[in-house]
Image (cartoon, grey):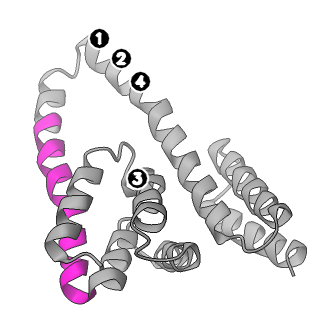
Amino acid sequence: MPDAVGLFVFFAKLSLLAVGGANAAVPEMHREIVEVHRWMSDATFSQGYALAASAPGPNVLFVAVLGWTLAGWTGLAGALLGMLGPTWVVAYGVGSLAQRLSHDWRMAAVRAGLVPVAIGLSLATGLVTGGAAARGTGLEVAVCVAITAGAWLWVWQGRGSPGWALVMGGSLGLLLLR
């Protein structure tokens, strides 16, 4: 099991790759924590994600849940500081630069280029957590991934609130996966 310093270093590296927020790094968190190091099971990971996602507040709460689960209060602090610290420094620097270059065509190109990256990383997060939440047969995994992809498309196309996507996805999961 990792200690607070190890969690700080792990999440500090991930934070610099999280284009679009902490949720964009969830597939890599899952890979490292569940598959590579085997610090927790798929079920524990997906339950922690669901718990943090259902709580009011920012999505980065998931990192705090992971840190606490892996190393208690010191793990919570290490994980959260690792995820927030480096990104804050980079965001402050880039924000200052972006403000000075706000009318430059290159800045508009960078912004436009980051949109599909953030969307793709968000979709990957949904697919990884949807697959991890499924237990049992390949059909159950396929149903969970299909529900996740459908909810993502519905929200992405601007047709509704993510809250309704959660309610509908949960209801479909209960009906189809009893």
The amino acid marked with disc number 2 is Ala
Which residue position is annotated with label 4?
A: 113
Q: Quadrant of residue 176?
A: bottom right
Span shown in magenta: 72-94
Residue 169 belongs to magenta span: no
Which residue position is annotated with label 2?
A: 109
- Separation (CA) of disc 2 from disc 1: 6 Å
Q: Quadrant of residue 105?
A: top left
Numbered circle sitting on residue 105: 1
Residue 75 belongs to magenta span: yes
- Give the camera-side residue of 62 and 29: 29
Residue 32: x, y in percent? Answer: 40, 60
**CB-based contact (under 8 Å), mark 2 and mark 1:** yes
Which callout, 4 or 1, points to the residue nearer the camera?
4
- Separation (CA) of disc 4 from disc 1: 12 Å
Structural crowding at the residue carrying mark 2, measured as other residues with C-alpha within 10 Å and reported as few (<14), some (14–19) or many (≥20): few
**CB-based contact (under 8 Å), mark 4 and mark 3:** no
The amino acid marked with disc number 3 is Ala
**CB-based contact (under 8 Å), mark 3 and mark 1:** no
**CB-based contact (under 8 Å), mark 2 and mark 4:** yes
- Separation (CA) of disc 3 from disc 2: 23 Å
Which residue position is annotated with label 3?
A: 25
Which residue sits at x=19%, y=29%?
98
Q: Is residue 81 visible?
A: no
Q: Measured along the vertical axis of the image, is residue 127 above or below residue 111?
A: below
- Separation (CA) of disc 2 from disc 4: 6 Å
